[in-house]
Amino acid sequence: MTAMSILSRLRRLRPRHAALAASLAGALALAAACGSTEPRSVPIEQTLFADTLHVTLSQFTRLPSGMYVKDVTVGTGADVAVGQTLSVRYVGNLANGRQFDANPAPKALFQFKLGAGQVIPGWDIGIQGMKVGGRRMLIIPPELAYGANSVGSIPAYSVLVFTVDVVSAS
């Protein structure tokens, strides 16, 4: 709810609530003057991760984009390259540990062209440099995922944690 809609509702309160309404309106005006009251993203470094995700940032590499990556298993196949079509398995979690998507076997492999914008930017950036047969964890800031948009069960400004297995590249 925005500050304007709250103020609009407060104006309709009964006179006996006028003092409370005035106090709340003042607080909202101060908050609006200091910046937006809308939710904002929390930097990855300040994000609390569920223990089940096994995220210790000091074990990850921070990329210039601001996302973090960690090779769980370095593949033995060829390096993946921008422009290749990759077939992957993945699990996607919110920082609180809640899984929002996955494609385990026997589901079909997920295919996309690396670097073509067919996936969120965090995938195009974070999967580069992997080898076929590799598994990598990606910690993606909202700016490289869905930003201010809620998508399905993913709330706005969510840090996403993916584990991606590259099965093949062509």
Image (tube, grey):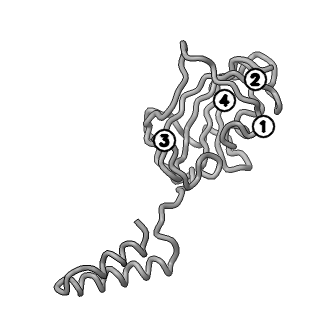
Q: Residues within 10 Å of mark 3 (few under 14, many from 20)?
A: few
Q: Position of residue 76 (x, y in %)?
A: 75, 16
Q: Amino acid at mark 2?
A: Lys
Say if 66 sits above or below 162 in the image: below
Question: Horizontal placement of 109 versus 101: left or right?
Answer: right
- Nearest to N terminus: mark 2 or mark 4: 4
Query: What label does residue 131 carry, if any?
Result: 2
Frontmost residue, 142 versus 51: 142
Q: Nearer the viewer, mark 3 or mark 4?
A: 3
Where is mark 3, residue-wise? 152
Q: Position of residue 46 (x, y in %)?
A: 52, 54
Question: Could you say whether the residue bearing mark 4 is in a helix, strand or loop?
Answer: strand
Mark 2–mark 4 distance (CA, rounded to whole Å): 10 Å
Say if 84 sits above or below 106 in the image: below
Query: What label does residue 71 carry, if any?
Result: 4
Q: Residues within 10 Å of mark 1 (few under 14, many from 20)?
A: some
Q: Amino acid at mark 3?
A: Gly
Q: Nearer the viewer, mark 3 or mark 1?
A: 3
Mark 2–mark 1 distance (CA, rounded to whole Å): 16 Å
Question: Could you say whether the residue bearing mark 1 is in a helix, strand or loop?
Answer: loop
- Nearest to N terminus: mark 4 or mark 1: 4
